[in-house]
Each structure stands twice: as C-alpha cells, then as structure tokens.
Image (cartoon, rainbow, N blue to C red):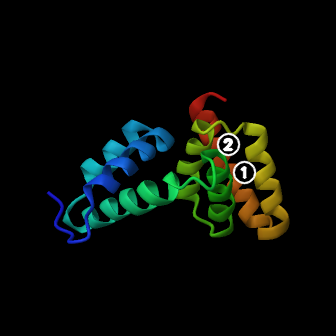
Amino acid sequence: MPQDPFFNQTLFDKGLEVRKEVLGKDYVESSLAKADDFMQAFQEFTTQYCWGIIWNRPGLDRRTRSFLNLAMLIALNRPNELKLHIGGALNNGITKEEIKEVCLQAFIYCGVPASLDAFKVAQQVFAERGI
C-alpha cells in the first residue's frame, strides 16, 4: 500500500497503462515487483507523473515523445534508460532507420562519444529483437 501522502491512484492507474504499452508489460511489472521500501516512492512518482501526466498530455503523440526521449537520453549519456526507450520507441512505431537518424543528429549536437554509445545501445536492442 502506498505510503506517500501525494500518491494519487487515478494518476497511477493511467500512468501504469501507458507505461506498460510503451515499455512492455513484463518490464514494468518486474520493476514494480522489485521495488523495495527504498525504490517504491520512485516507482510511484514515475508512474504517476511521468506516465500518468506527461505521457497522457494531448500536445504530443507518443512517437514524438519517443523521439524527444531518445535525443535527450543520448545527450545526457544515459545508456540504460536509452536502451529501455529505444524499445519503447519501437513499440511506438519508430523505425530502425529513424532511430539511426536520431543517433546521427546526436553526432552533430552531442558529440561523437554520445552518438557512438547510442549506436551501440541501439544495436543491442535490435539484436535482442531480431531486427
């Protein structure tokens, strides 16, 4: 049972639905199941605010949000989250070719090391998915 006084069940439920659709049911359920007392608040906060509010806003579609996430995660050099969101981008209909273009765009604006890491992470995801 959530202990956070800011927990909102409606936002959590909306966020959980979108989170599973984008990142995959197995990944999300595993993340929630592994959450101990230390991580529980993070899981709740992420599900409510990131997925329940931001990903449900009408201003951008999921493909656009995925493109933005890929670019920001490359720029921030967050390979673990990038791997997760490359999978989410594929789930949102972004193609391998489009992901390559995001990585190339990052080459110019974020630098060679960031782009190279992004290409390597994308290759791993493609290999895991047989793409």
Q: Nearer the viewer, residue 13 or 36?
A: 13
The quadrant the N terminus occupies is: bottom left
**What label sits on residue 10 in the rendered view?**
none
Q: Quadrant of residue 130?
A: top right
41 to the left or right of 67: left
Task: Name the residue rendered at 39%, 42% in the picture.
Answer: 17
Helix, strand or loop under label 2:
helix
**What label sits on residue 123 in the rendered view?**
2
Task: Name the residue rendered at 36%, 59% in the picture.
Answer: 48
Q: Quadrant of residue 89?
A: top right
Q: Quadrant of residue 79?
A: bottom right
Alpha-carbon distance for marks 2 and 1? 6 Å
Residue 26: x percent and y percent?
37, 37
Residue lying farthest to the right in this orientation: 108
Circle 2 packing at 10 Å, graded few (<14), some (14-19), many (20+), is some
Task: Name the residue rendered at 62%, 56% in the picture.
Answer: 59
Task: Name the residue rendered at 30%, 53% in the picture.
Answer: 10
Residue matched to label 1: 119
Helix, strand or loop under label 1:
helix
Residue lying farthest to the front in this orientation: 58
Residue 103: x percent and y percent?
76, 54
Residue 12: x percent and y percent?
32, 54
Q: Nearer the viewer, residue 58 or 52?
A: 58
Amino acid marked by disc 1: Phe
6 to the left or right of 3: right
44 to the left or right of 3: right
**Cβ–Cβ under 8 Å for marks 2 and 1:** yes
Circle 1 packing at 10 Å, graded few (<14), some (14-19), many (20+), is some
